[in-house]
């Protein structure tokens, strides 16, 4: 490992990999540090992504476990809302195989010239005169200082790097979705359909998902608000009860646990010499918890902005703000803002109100589906919604 790079990236997930590729494509030196011994494993994800992933990378068929053409939402009273591709938006697309996908993204960065070090952990930040200028790395039993013009923190939901640089990254307990997921087989499911189950009894302030991984196999998981967890009412308790009722013949072949932030993004995602991307910047979707595409988009953008700033000789917070402004102004940034407000409304809804919404959406004419029509019809059947929707900007 060199002791100097133009850009040092902490974390080899989708955010770090895209950043690394963008930096070396701009002709600069770059290094990705990943604490785990293998990129992409263990998987802590339901692996669902929307079609728009193709705007960021050429999808290789071997990265895809399942192609998803539709989704269904199951209300607390069991009513089913079938979402066609237009309504389902990001929920139709693909279920990836992240063991392969994450590794290949890093592979692409490495092939383009980025150095990669696995089983290498950043243990603190190097800060001089208020500017982040590298990290202390524990690797192969040694402790090294690695210096860089810009450090990109892509260290995921468990991110510590930005905190070491003095940035408050705390997520309130109520805004952490605590998740458990099984990979299950022997399931009678439609391999082209993803399902979401709602309701206080099923998943308080969260949902259960069944994301197809192909014939008879799926990621079956649950996320519930951290504040709802207590003895006997933990995510695994809810998930096991769900499986006993809905998938009694399924066989569990893998178990994962993890957390997803459902909070607002960090107030500022840059500092002198530092850019924060993906989950580390709290950029997963507050409603769905999806963060793969957001991490990829912000990782790529961070790599490009870092390269530009290095070329101009100015890696100050002011110069790097171009990154912060760009993602907030993007479709992703605007979507995160809106979805945070929508989430705040929906987590407060009682089951009867959720049932009523699903019931009224089921009455809609899908041929003329658009947002204005949806809101007008929803309010017609659920006048109480007017007050809440009025708070959406
Ligand atoms: P990560 O993928 O988390 O990568 C960060 C990397 O940094 C990790 O490999 C970690 O080992 C490494 N790292 C951390 N600290 C250090 C350190 N000090 N030194 C070196 N390396 C370090 N998103 C979706 O889009 N669709 C889904 O269906 C979906 N389902 C999910 C289900 C669950 C149960 C969970 C927990 C998450 C889910 N997500 C989903 C979220 C998704 O996994 C993340 O948004 C995405 O992985 C974020 O990418 P990232 O690159 O920011 O971070």
Image: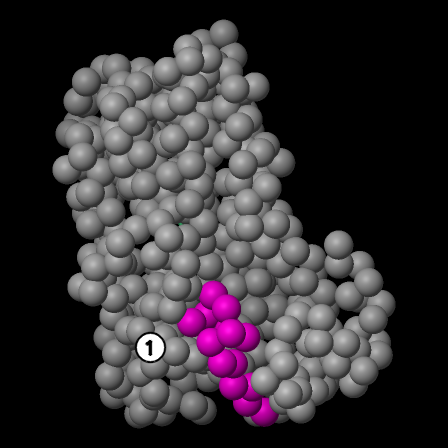
* Among the 4 quarters of the image, the one containing residue 155: top left
Q: Residue at coordinates 20% horizontally, 65% vertically from top-left? A: 61
Tell me if 165 is positioned left or right of 187 in this view. Answer: right
Q: Is residue 178 visible?
A: no
Q: Secondary structure at mark 1?
A: strand
Q: Residue at coordinates 39% horizontally, 78% vertically from top-left? A: 69
Is residue 87 in the magenta section?
yes
Q: Residue at coordinates 45% horizontally, 16% vertically from top-left? A: 315
Q: Position of residue 76 (x, y in %)?
A: 61, 85
Q: Would you place residue 117 above or below residue 375 in this image?
A: above
Going by the picture, which residue comes out furthest to the front?
A: 368
The figure's colour scheme reads one colour
Tell me if 294 is positioned left or right of 190 in this view. Answer: right
Q: Quadrant of the N terminus?
A: top left
Q: Would you place residue 175 above or below residue 246 in this image?
A: above
Tell me if 183 is positioned left or right of 359 in this view. Answer: left
Q: Would you place residue 77 above or below residue 206 in this image?
A: below
Range of residues picked out in magenta:
79-92
Q: Position of residue 214 (x, y in %)?
A: 26, 78
Seen from the viewer's position, the closer of residues 352 and 304 is: 304
Q: Quadrant of the C terminus?
A: bottom right
Q: Residue at coordinates 29% horizontally, 27% vertically from top-left? A: 26
Residue carrying label 1: 212
Is residue 235 in the magenta section?
no
Going by the picture, which residue comes out furthest to the top?
A: 129
Q: Position of residue 117 (x, y in %)?
A: 19, 33
Seen from the viewer's position, the closer of residues 305 and 152 is: 305
Q: Position of residue 8 (x, y in %)?
A: 32, 25
């Amino acid at each position: 490992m060199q002791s100097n790079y133009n850009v040092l990236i902490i974390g080899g997930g989708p955010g770090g990999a895209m950043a690394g590729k963008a930096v070396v494509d701009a002709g600069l030196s770059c290094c990705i540090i990943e604490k785990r011994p293998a990129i992409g494993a263990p998987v802590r994800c339901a692996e669902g992504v929307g079609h728009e992933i193709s705007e960021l990378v050429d999808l290789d068929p071997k990265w895809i476990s399942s192609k998803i053409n539709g989704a269904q939402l199951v209300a607390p009273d069991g009513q089913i809302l079938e979402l066609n591709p237009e309504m389902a938006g990001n929920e139709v697309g693909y279920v990836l195989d992240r063991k392969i996908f994450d590794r290949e993204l890093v592979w692409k960065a490495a092939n383009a010239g980025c150095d990669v070090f696995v089983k290498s952990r950043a243990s603190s930040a190097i800060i001089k005169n208020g500017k982040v200028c590298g990290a202390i790395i524990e690797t192969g039993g040694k402790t090294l200082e690695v210096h860089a013009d810009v450090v990109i923190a892509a260290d995921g939901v468990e991110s510590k790097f930005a905190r070491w640089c003095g940035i408050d990254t705390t997520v309130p307990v109520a805004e952490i979705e605590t998740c458990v997921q099984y990979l299950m087989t022997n399931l009678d499911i439609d391999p082209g359909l993803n399902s979401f189950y709602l309701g206080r009894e099923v998943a308080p302030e969260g949902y259960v998902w069944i994301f197809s991984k192909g014939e008879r196999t799926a990621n079956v998981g649950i996320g519930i608000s951290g504040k709802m967890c207590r003895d006997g009412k933990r995510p695994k308790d809810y998930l096991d009860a769900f499986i006993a009722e809905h998938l009694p013949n399924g066989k569990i072949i893998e178990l994962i646990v993890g957390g997803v932030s459902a909070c607002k993004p960090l107030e500022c995602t840059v500092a002198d010499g530092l850019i924060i991307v993906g989950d580390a910047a709290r950029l997963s979707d507050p409603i769905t918890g999806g963060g793969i595409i957001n991490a990829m988009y912000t990782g790529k953008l961070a790599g490009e902005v870092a390269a530009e700033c290095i070329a101009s000789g100015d890696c100050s917070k002011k110069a790097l703000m171009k990154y912060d402004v760009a993602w907030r102004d993007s479709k992703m940034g605007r979507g995160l803002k809106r979805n945070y407000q929508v989430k705040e409304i929906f987590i407060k809804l009682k089951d009867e109100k959720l049932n009523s919404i699903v019931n009224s959406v089921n009455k809609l004419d899908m041929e003329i589906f658009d947002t204005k029509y949806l809101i007008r019809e929803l309010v017609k059947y659920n006048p109480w919604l007017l007050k809440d929707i009025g708070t959406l900007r």
